[in-house]
Amino acid sequence: MSRKKKYELKKEIEEKKKILKNEFGMEDFHSGGDLPPEIESQFLDHIMEFEKQFQQQNNTTVYKRIGSPDFIKPDKLQENQLSEELEKITKLMNKNGIRLDTICEVEEKEIYRFITEELFDQEIEDINIPGMMTTFIYEEFYPNHEYDIKENSEDVLNYILKPDKEFWEYIPFERENFISKDGSKINEGKLKKAIFDFKDSFSSFTLNKFEFTTVKFDIKRKEGIAEFEISYNAKPESGTDNIKFEGKGIFSLNFEYEFWAVSGIDMPGLAI
């Protein structure tokens, strides 16, 4: 790029930053110090277009955004049509900046039903910027509680079986209603001390086996359990031989604020 062209681009960039500041109130806007000027200019164009559309504050629905297409009702759809029709709809959604993701495996028939009977009616901001996607997650509408219980139980187990103590506040423990093995309530301070004392007793852990055997939950009661079989080695701080812990364990969980948190621990080597 010629020196003159670079100079002109720099002037354009500064003008666009002034517009973002004066018209949209974006003080001291920085778009990335090392971006090539032509990329930075395009980036600022996208930001300005987004702000213009956002300030109009118009809403639409997913169905209108993708052009209100004709589609076959789920109860009229033949089995041999399913994959093709679902692909057509998802491609049309993606083309218009709408994406549906799933965390777990969901049958195509259910995805098609969900899109055409529920997602199409979802209200969204009427902002359509090339390259920008509005993403929906199926499980935010239909949580997979078994999956969430397993994931959060594994997060707790992995935290227990590592020596460092970082990120305590992000681990899915029940901090207000943790119940000990004898049925008494434990506050967060005592729970944290019990976990950290266990960690301090060993210099390292090796997980040999971890398998869920039973996962149960009752949403009305907001309670769940995860039973498992486990085998792990723990090396004492004293430097003696590894100690092997194995057997059955169970995590109790509570469901609050759309979130499963471990509220009880009983496993080989650690029962709180």
Image: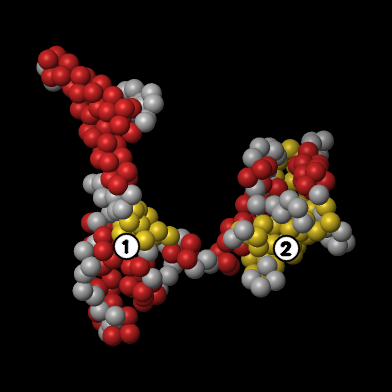
Question: Which picture quadrant has residue 5?
Answer: top left
Q: Is residue 22 above or below residue 117?
A: above
Depth check: 247 or 78 in front? 78
Q: How is the image coloured?
A: secondary structure
Depth check: 248 or 42 in front? 42
Determine which residue is flagged by label 1.
61
Identify the amino acid type marked 1: Thr
Depth check: 26 or 192 in front? 26
- Where is residue 59? Give x, y as percent: 33, 56
- For label 2, the crowd category at 10 Å Cα-Cα, with few meaning under 14, some 14 to 19 and many 20 or more, is many
Identify the amino acid type marked 2: Ser
At a point 24% along the width and 56% down the height, the residue shown is 96
Q: Secondary structure at mark 2?
A: strand
Determine which residue is flagged by label 2.
252
Depth check: 192 or 208 in front? 192
At a point 68% along the width and 67% down the height, the residue shown is 222
Q: Secondary structure at mark 1?
A: strand
